[in-house]
Image (tube, helix red, strand yellow):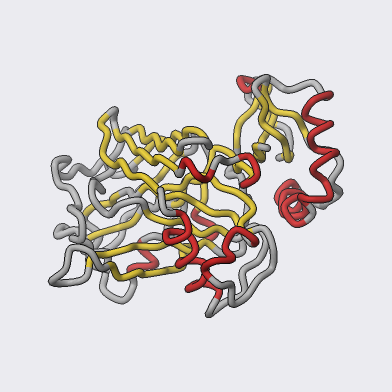
């Protein structure tokens, strides 16, 4: 099942946000979950997914879908309690061992498909870069999860772009404040939908690609999910309780991160999930060298 939050649009007007299932025919509104908001309804559907599945499948099969051209997809998680992001950096003097870094990104940074990334004016920030991520959606309250048990707590998958402010040398913005440089409003494009883990052929892994202005900048594969995902969930849950709807964004590769600037169109495609597209706007019209790239391992956290 492919979950989304959406607005039905008619001219310049839009309906209040609703929870829906995305099918080949469009979006089917979910009206079997009672909650004060669409975001709360999604978290309830995640928590009660096993019990609700038969009714949701029947709803998707029997209800009339709203065509996609008549809806606007919102961030599939309206207000996740937590967004955790990872960076795996090669350790010095070795090409095989990696050091895992986990940092917190503001839940308020999310935007959805067709959203707009707005580049702010930050003292010391001289360039803004992208990093494509495989995003996990947590399905149950959990603490101290063993790496081998990660499947028991993951509800589904979506795509994310971790956008961050950097210095001209591509070091993350302001030593000691790097998480703030990733937490600006609109710096967490997420979506386009959440696909339930039960729908994914995990043995096939994932392919993750990012284009900017039509140029393929990042390309990564996730094959060993036990190592890539289990390790991160074990690390995160060892220090904090994870809740339904929390997001953990796992970077595919540090290589290929490049600058974003006014007018750019960015697309991220995650196999088995879909393509997320956003635009970039810089109110100050700044420009930087488009040829600069973060090479593998050359990221200062």
- When the figure is inspected, residue 201 is found, relative to residue 11, above or below; the finding is below
Q: Nearer the viewer, residue 252 or 69?
A: 252
Q: Nearer the viewer, residue 31 or 48?
A: 48
Please indicate whether residue 276 sits to the left or right of residue 213 in the image: right
- When the figure is inspected, residue 254 is found, relative to residue 149, above or below; the finding is above
When asked about the image quadrant of residue 16, the answer is top right
Task: Specify the quadrant that holds the C terminus.
Answer: bottom left
Badge count:
0
x, y (%) of residue 94? 16, 68
Please indicate whether residue 297 sits to the left or right of residue 178 in the image: left
x, y (%) of residue 147? 52, 68
- Residue at image position (45%, 49%) is 134
- When the figure is inspected, residue 129 is found, relative to residue 55, above or below; the finding is below
Please indicate whether residue 69 sits to the left or right of residue 84 in the image: right
Please indicate whether residue 61 sits to the left or right of residue 230 in the image: right
x, y (%) of residue 284? 29, 44
- Residue at image position (37%, 54%) is 251
Task: Specify the quadrant that holds the N terminus.
Answer: top right
x, y (%) of residue 110? 52, 51
- Residue at image position (60%, 49%) is 156
Q: Nearer the viewer, residue 67 or 86?
A: 86
When asked about the image quadrant of residue 102, the answer is bottom left
- When the figure is inspected, residue 176 is found, relative to residue 212, above or below; the finding is below
Q: Nearer the viewer, residue 186 or 47?
A: 47
- Residue at image position (67%, 33%) is 7
């Amino acid at each position: 099942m492919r979950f989304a939050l959406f607005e039905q649009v008619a001219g310049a007007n839009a309906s209040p946000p609703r929870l829906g299932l995305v099918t080949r025919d469009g979006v089917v509104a979910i009206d079997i979950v009672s909650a004060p908001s669409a975001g709360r309804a999604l978290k309830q559907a995640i928590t009660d997914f096993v019990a609700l599945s038969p009714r949701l499948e029947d709803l998707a099969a029997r209800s009339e879908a709203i065509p996609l051209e008549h809806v606007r997809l919102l961030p599939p998680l309206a207000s996740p309690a937590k967004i955790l992001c990872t960076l795996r950096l090669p350790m010095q003097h070795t090409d095989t061992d990696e050091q895992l870094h986990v940092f917190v990104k503001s839940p308020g940074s999310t935007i959805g498909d067709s959203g707009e990334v707005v580049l702010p004016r930050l003292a010391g920030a001289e360039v803004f870069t992208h990093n494509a991520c495989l995003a996990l959606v947590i399905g149950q309250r959990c603490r101290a999860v063993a790496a081998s048990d990660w499947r028991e707590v993951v509800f589904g998958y979506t795509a994310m772009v971790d956008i961050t402010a950097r210095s001209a040398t591509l070091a993350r913005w302001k030593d000691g404040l790097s998480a703030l440089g990733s937490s600006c409003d609109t710096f967490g494009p997420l979506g386009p939908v959440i696909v339930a883990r039960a729908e994914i052929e995990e043995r096939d892994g994932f392919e993750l690609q990012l284009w900017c202005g039509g140029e393929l900048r990042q390309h990564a594969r996730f094959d060993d999910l036990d190592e890539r995902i289990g390790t991160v969930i074990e690390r995160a849950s060892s220090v904090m309780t994870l809740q339904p709807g929390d997001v953990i964004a796992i970077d595919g590769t540090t290589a290929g991160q490049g600058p974003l600037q006014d007018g750019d169109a960015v697309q991220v495609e995650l196999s088995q999930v879909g393509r997320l597209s956003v635009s970039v706007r810089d109110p100050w019209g700044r420009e930087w060298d488009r040829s600069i790239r973060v090479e593998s391992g050359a990221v200062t956290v």
